Amino acid sequence: MTPPAPPAASPAPTPASGAGQVAAVIFDLDGVLLDSEQVWDEVRQAFVAERGGRWADDSTARMMGMSTAEWSAYLVELGAGDSAEEIAAEVRGRVAARYGDDPPLLPGAVAAVRAMAARWPLGLASSSPRVLIDLVLDRSGLRREFRHTISSEEVPRGKPAPDVYLEAVRRLGVPAGAAVAVEDSANGLRAAAAAGIVVVAVPNEHFPPGPEALALASAQVDRVADLTPEIVLAAAGRRPAPPQPA
């Protein structure tokens, strides 16, 4: 007598779209790869003071993540001049001069980028002007590691709006849910999360994000030097639950 066939194995559960899978990694620039957030702050504060404007208590926090058009228009509101275009050009030039021939890369940034590039296509989604993105990548030797680089100058809105991240995944040709972003600031974390991208937080040493913004991250490291492919994969597997309606 032929023994009965064993019962068919139950199919493995299907993971949620993008869960635990990584198709691309997208880096922020300022504060993640470059120790520059305080440079921008110092330059803009000095510029406003020189022009007879008045710096507000929340000006630093408000401008983190703004696009060039947004922060230069805001400096007009602070009384730093009448022409946003002139302000943008002057501030960009001063920041470039501070970078010089040796941009202030954070320790371990180059190694972290190359480790990620060995596994996945990379994008860069930055609030820095295009001219400064190109300057930093050329002088650091990192340009060839990135498939696509996007400045918030090239999208309608800066961070915390998701525009720059949505454009990054569009150019990379990957679903937002299969990308992982590396961010340092509150507005950067909000932008990536709003785009539906998993986030690894590298809290900015000079302007650390608050707990509400950090709660949007699936993983956190103290320094970019600590970022590994294993952390990226683990973050992709534990996307935070969406907030519950009130």
Image (spheres, rainbow, N blue to C red):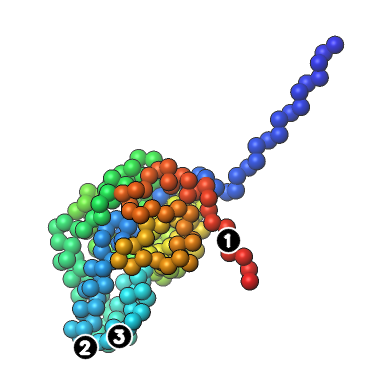
In what element is the residue under mark 2? loop
Image coordinates of residue 32 in percent, x first then y, are: 32, 57
Query: What is the three-letter code of the residue carrying label 3?
Result: Leu
Residue 195 makes an appearance in the image: no
Q: Which residue is mark 3?
A: 78
Upstream in the sequence, badge 2 or badge 3? Answer: 2
Question: Residue 52 got which mark?
Answer: 2
Upstream in the sequence, badge 2 or badge 1? Answer: 2
Which quarter of the rendered picture does the C terminus lie within? bottom right
Image coordinates of residue 182 in percent, x first then y, are: 39, 55
Q: Residue at x 31, y 49 (%)?
A: 225
Q: Residue at x 14, y 58 (%)?
A: 101
* 46 lies left or right of 33: left
Circle 3: is it few (<14), some (14-19), or many (20+) Cα within 10 Å? some
Query: What is the three-letter code of the residue carrying label 2?
Result: Gly
Q: Quadrant of residue 68?
A: bottom left
Q: Residue at x 37, y 76 (%)?
A: 62
Q: Quick check: 20 above or below 36?
A: above
Upstream in the sequence, badge 1 or badge 3? Answer: 3
Question: Residue 242 got which mark?
Answer: 1
Q: Quadrant of residue 151?
A: bottom left
Q: Are marks 1 and 3 in contact (CB under 8 Å)?
A: no
Q: Nearer the viewer, residue 73 or 182?
A: 182
Image coordinates of residue 243 in percent, x first then y, are: 58, 64
